[in-house]
Image: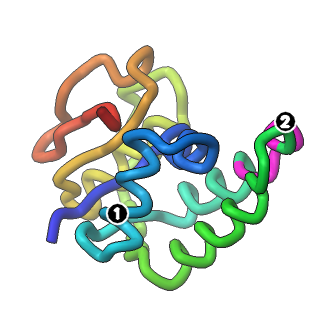
Amino acid sequence: MQKIIIDTNVIVSSLIQRNYPFFIINELFIGDKIQLCVSDELLTEYYEVLKRPKFSKFQDFFVKAESFLVDIETKATKFYPTIILNLISDDDDNMILELADECKADFVITGNTSDFTFSSYKQTKILTPR
């Protein structure tokens, strides 16, 4: 099973509209076709971002977010990165690469092409949801 790290922006998109991020979350992760890899830091970011008031304008956003977070807590595999990287100016993005290094992720899925300007990190390919 492929090890995947999903950036928070992809999760937000999956909760707002039915598009590629929605497919990744609902068909692949919920359908047990990929192994979602997380760390304590990434989980904290998921929780902090998904409760932002600005998402209240989207119908059922918070209900969907809660359900998704329960799925993550029960189905994702948690890793504990031991290295600290400073390859990207945004520390949150470095956190994702640290996790990728620790779990030997096959893919990082992110919509953040402004910070992730490279196509791979070690064995991990960095892709957009598309």
In three-dimensional space, the C-alpha distance between marks 2 and 1, rounded to whole angstroms, equals 27 Å
Location of residue 6 with respect to 80 vertically, above or below = above
Circle 2 sits on which residue? 54
Q: Which residue ends up furthest to the left in the rendered image?
A: 123
Q: Quadrant of the C terminus?
A: top left
Between 89 and 67, the residue placed more toward the observer is 67
Look at the image and give the residue range highlighted in magenta. Answer: 50-55
Location of residue 106 with respect to 34 vertically, above or below = above
Q: Classify mark 1: residues with Cα within 10 Å, few (<14), some (14-19) or many (20+).
A: few
Which residue type does callout 2 highlight?
Lys
Circle 1 sits on which residue? 27
**Mark 2 touches mark 1? (CB < 8 Å):** no
Which residue type does callout 1 highlight?
Glu
Quadrant of residue 109 in the image?
A: top left
Membership of 51 in magenta stretch: yes
Location of residue 14 with respect to 126 vertically, above or below = below
Quadrant of residue 73 in the image?
A: bottom right
